[in-house]
Image (cartoon, rainbow, N blue to C red):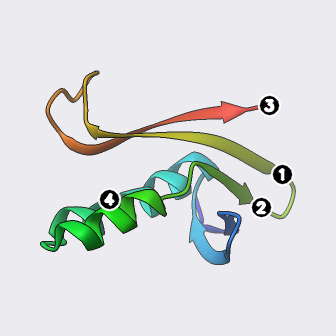
């Protein structure tokens, strides 16, 4: 399967990316944001970054658009209990 072009819209900016499926593109982008939080040593900077995380993300393809609600947790209580800055995606119809 060839990669396709998508645009990630987080409300404040639009980012052109390539990927296979909209959900996978969203997860890859959010994992990059999560890694940035995990490696930040300054607590104040990490707090500001956490507040700036996207709560809604839209993936625009050439034929379709998918929107997702992102729920962030400082310390995961669900499937990945104890993990820092975990998130879950729910597709919005």
- Give me the C-alpha separation between circle 1 and circle 3: 12 Å
Q: Is residue 32 visible?
A: no
- Which of discs 1 and 3 lies nearer the camera? The answer is 3
What residue is shown with label 3?
93
What residue is shown with label 4?
34
Q: Which of 59 and 85 lies nearest the eye of the viewer?
A: 85
**For the residue labelled by badge 4, is the local secondary structure a helix, a strand or a loop?**
helix
What residue is shown with label 2?
61
* Residue 83 image offset from top left, x and y in percent: 17, 39
Chain-order first, disc 2 or disc 4 = 4
Chain-order first, disc 1 or disc 3 = 1
* Residue 46 image offset from top left, x and y in percent: 27, 66
Q: Which of 50 and 68 lies nearest the eye of the viewer?
A: 50
What residue is shown with label 1?
64
- Give me the C-alpha separation between circle 2 and circle 4: 24 Å
- Give me the C-alpha separation between circle 2 and circle 3: 16 Å
* Residue 93 image offset from top left, x and y in percent: 80, 31
């Amino acid at each position: 399967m060839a990669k396709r072009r998508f645009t990630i819209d987080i409300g404040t900016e639009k980012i052109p990316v390539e990927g296979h499926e909209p959900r996978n593109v969203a997860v890859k982008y959010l994992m990059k944001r999560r890694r940035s939080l995990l490696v930040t040593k300054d607590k104040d900077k990490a707090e500001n970054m956490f507040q700036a995380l996207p709560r809604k993300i839209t993936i625009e393809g050439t034929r379709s658009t998918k929107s997702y609600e992102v729920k962030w947790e400082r310390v995961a209580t669900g499937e990945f209990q104890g993990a820092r800055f975990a998130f879950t995606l729910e597709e919005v119809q």
